[in-house]
Each structure stands twice: as C-alpha cells, then as structure tokens.
Amino acid sequence: MTSISPDRRSVDSALDPSAEQIRDMGGRAVEWIAAYHDSIRDLPIGPRTSAAALKELLAEPLPVEGRDFTDLLTVFREVIVPGSRHNGHPRFFGYVSAPGTAVAAVADFLASALNANLTAWRSAPAPAELEHVAIDWIKEALGCDPGAGGLFMSGGSMANFTALAAARHRHCGDAVATHGAAAHPAPLRVYASTETHHSIHKAAALLGIGRANVREIPVDACFRMDVDALVRAIEEDRAAGAEPFCVVANAGTVVTGAVDPLADIAAVARRYRLWMHVDACYGGFARLAPSARPLFDGMSEADSIALDPHKWLYLPADCGCLIYRDPEAARRAFSLDADYTRVMQTEPAEAFAFWDYGPDLSRRFRALKVWMALAHAGSRAVGDAVEGNLDCARHLAELVDASADFELLAPVELSIFCFRYLPGSAHAGSRSQSDEEELDRLNERIMLALQQAGSSYLSNATINGRFALRGCVLNYRTTRRDMEILLDDVRRAAEQAIEETR
C-alpha cells in the first residue's frame, strides 16, 4: 500500500485551501467591505421582508458536498446584506448600536485567523499581554487607579452578571459558593435605580439573589438616582434584618442616557460598606469627550465598572469589558483549581489566568480590535467623534424645542434623545387622558412608518407613562444635517400615519 505523506496538501481541500485560494477569497471579501463602507449612507436602513421570505431563500438540508466560495459570497451579497438592518447608517438611531470601523473589522478577521484562545498567559502569551495593554488604556480613559485590573467579555450583560457575582462573594465568602444561597442566613439586597438595565435583575435571578431583592430606587426629574431615597432604603432593610451588599449606579441609562450622581453614591457605598458597581456600558467612554467628563466624577471609586467597547469605541460586536478596582477581590470569587487548568509557571505574570476573574474559560481574542482601533485612530479622534455625537443630540433637542410640532420628553444628557410628534390639535389647551393615549397610538404608528420608509430609524421608550420616539447618536458618520433630515422624515411619517386613519 502506498503511504501518503502528512505534509501533502489536498489539491481542492475546502478545509485547507492554498495561499492563492485564500488570497482570492479574502480579496473579494475586502472589495465588498470597501464598497459597503463607501455606500452605506445611500442604503435603506432596514429591509422590507419577512421571516417566511428569508427562510425560503436560505433554508436547505445540511450540505453533504461543499459549494464554491463564489456561490456563498453571492448568497451573502444577494440575500444576507439586503435582508439585514444597516446599523452603520448615519441615521440609524435605534437602541444603542455602533457602526463598527474598518480597521476593527480587519482586526476581527486577523484574530479569527490566528484563533488564539485567551484562557491564560500560557495559552496565548502575546495576545494575553495585548489584552493587559488594552485594559490599561481603558483604565486610563476612565481615570482609574493604575492598580485596577480587568478583562474583556461578550458584552455588558455578562459584565454586570460577573460584577454581581464578585460582589456577592466579597460579602458572603466561600459559604454560598460551596453550599448555595441557602447557606447565607439573611436575604441579600442590591440597590439600583428604576432606570437600571434589566440585566441587573436577570443577574440577581441567575445568581440566586432573587429579582425581588433588587430594590429599585426612585429617580429625580432628570432620571438620576435619588441618593436620599437610597440611604432610606438601606436603613429600612438593615432594620428589617436584610443585608445590603451592593449598589449599582448608572453612567448613562439605556432609556434616557442619564448619569447618576456617582460621587455621592460612592460616598454612600463607603459609609455602608457596599460594593459599588457602575453600569457604564453605554456612557462610560463619553468621558473621552471634554464636555461630558465632569459627569463621570466618582466613577473611578467604584469596585467594578461594566463597559461595552462595541458601543462608544465604535467596535463591531461583540466586545464587553469589566474593570475591577481590586482584582484580588474578584479573584477569590472565580478561582477554582482543576488538574487540567493547573498552572506550572512560577513567574507571576506568566502564571496569570483570565479564568480567575470571570466565568469564561474559552475566550476569543477581542483585545486585538480594541488595541488596533485605539492605536490606529488615537484617543483624541475617538473623543472628538464622541463629542460630535453629543453635539448632534443637543442639536436635535434644540430643534425640537424650537418646533411647533414636536415635544421633548426627557433632558438630553449624553447622546440619547426622547421626543414625540404633536399634531396641531394637541397644542390647544390641556390634554385629557384619552388625548394622551391617542398621542401614544399616533407616535407608535409614526415610528413604524418611519422604520419602514428606510431613511431614518428610531426605537421607542416609555417616559413618565407616555410613548416616546427614542434615538441614540452613536456613529462617527452622523452630522447635524442628519438630525434635521430625521425630523423631516418623522414629519413625513406623521402625515402618512394621520392619513391612514382618516
């Protein structure tokens, strides 16, 4: 029998293509990326399609034989792209979604090709060191102490979950980790404002703390946590035999963009020996913009900070981040020995393991796109882009205030804006409850018409019980002119919505 050398390459192997084939695939993919970035402003933001239509185009049995890359790229171009929402469009204001950058897309491509698994230093020495460098840059951007540490995660929800796990362990020690929540004799309490992201409640449920033990603190007229109400809640719970252990402050709420009084909350956390966690997933990197920097005074005093570089660092998803003021406090929550994870190195830097600071073992090389994007653009350019986003939101607020057919429903603190359309009849005299409900229904129809038209895109929020058109400027392509176009698009959608009800 003729033996086959292990070094021989299969001529047409789809799993191990030749260098020439890789260049061909990569070249055609890069050509599409360049054309996409060049034309994104002219694309309709969202598709007009259905799940059934897309399924008909995409569904097929598991392929037994492979297909040529040209066919696959054709499906991507002709089905996937037209059937996608284009979050990078300068007038996509829905949710909190960034456009990504070209250099970060290239970084993701390179990271996937290298396929480093950042479980520990020994698994990927240079990528692990680069993650430390990128984390240090983020600490510097936030004004954190040099002794702080952190790691990249899938997103803000996982960062919030991990922070609450570390906070609980500091308060409860190994008993709960070993025997479960029943081992702790008293109910635990987490404090968060009524505007806090739902991932905090989800984390409390998954950790066995319980959603009912997340005590919601009222907010002021600007949707910031009422610190006096926080103190009263803590005192009430202590008197009732519960154990307060964590307070969650917001550095940019998801609904209105409000920033809680961080320094005041930090003082309360010190007074009652609570772990202070800051959810800065949306707003934290706005500290790079000079006009917003004072809002974040006190953030560096937090025990943990959750961030989403895939928001205001303009990176493609996914890339979350968690910063610890005292990494050792977190290490005690997550360190767990197993023979297959035993570290043999004796040099501390080389014995470092990311699994000691969070729940993940396998971790992709997210740090490359963070490092490459910041190193390529520089923090000044990122800060200028953030400042431009803040300016666009303020400009929109000024236009709304000066208009006869719009009403602002919440103050603009960062780059989120909430407003509604008012027909002429709504300006005459006081409005009844039924009038308000009709305005809610009208603005809901306006939002749907706007989304279907494809020129601008808003999502929705409920502000003081009223339906709001909500937008978030999180795109370096967006200009003041785009805010003016948005209002014109809303007016057209309003005309359509009103006409359809006649």
Image: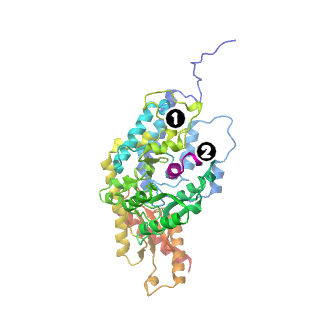
- Dot 1 alpha-carbon crowd within 10 angstroms: few under 14, some 14 to 19, many 20 or more: some
Give the percent coordinates (x, y) of residue 55. Answer: 65, 52
Residue drawn 57% across the image and 56% down it: 204
Give the main secondary structure, helix, strand or loop, of the magenta stretch: helix
According to the picture, the residue beneath numbered tag 2 turns out to be 178
Q: Is residue 240 above or below residue 497?
A: above
- Locate the C terminus and report the quarter of the image it occupies: bottom right
- Dot 2 alpha-carbon crowd within 10 angstroms: few under 14, some 14 to 19, many 20 or more: few
Residue 238 included in the magenta stretch of the image = no
Residue 173 included in the magenta stretch of the image = yes
Distance Cα–Cα, label 1 vs label 2: 29 Å
Residue drawn 48% across the image and 60% down it: 95
Q: Which mark is residue 182?
A: none
Whether residues under marks 1 and 2 lie with C-beta atoms below 8 angstroms apart, the answer is: no
Looking at the rendered structure, the kind of residue marked 1 is: Asn
According to the picture, the residue beneath numbered tag 1 turns out to be 117
- As drawn, is 350 to the left or to the right of 335? left
- As drawn, is 247 to the left or to the right of 285? right
Looking at the rendered structure, the kind of residue marked 2 is: Thr
Q: Nearer the viewer, mark 1 or mark 2?
A: 2
Residue drawn 59% across the image and 35% down it: 68
Is residue 476 in sight in this rendering?
Answer: no
Q: Which residues are magenta?
A: 158-175
Kind of element beneath mark 2:
helix
- Locate the N terminus and report the quarter of the image it occupies: top right
Q: Is residue 152 above or below residue 405?
A: above
Give the percent coordinates (x, y) of residue 169. Answer: 53, 48
> How is the rendered protein coloured?
rainbow
Is residue 462 in sight in this rendering?
Answer: yes
Query: Exactly how many numbered labels are in the figure?
Result: 2
Give the percent coordinates (x, y) of residue 461. Answer: 50, 67
* In front of the other: 400 or 172: 172
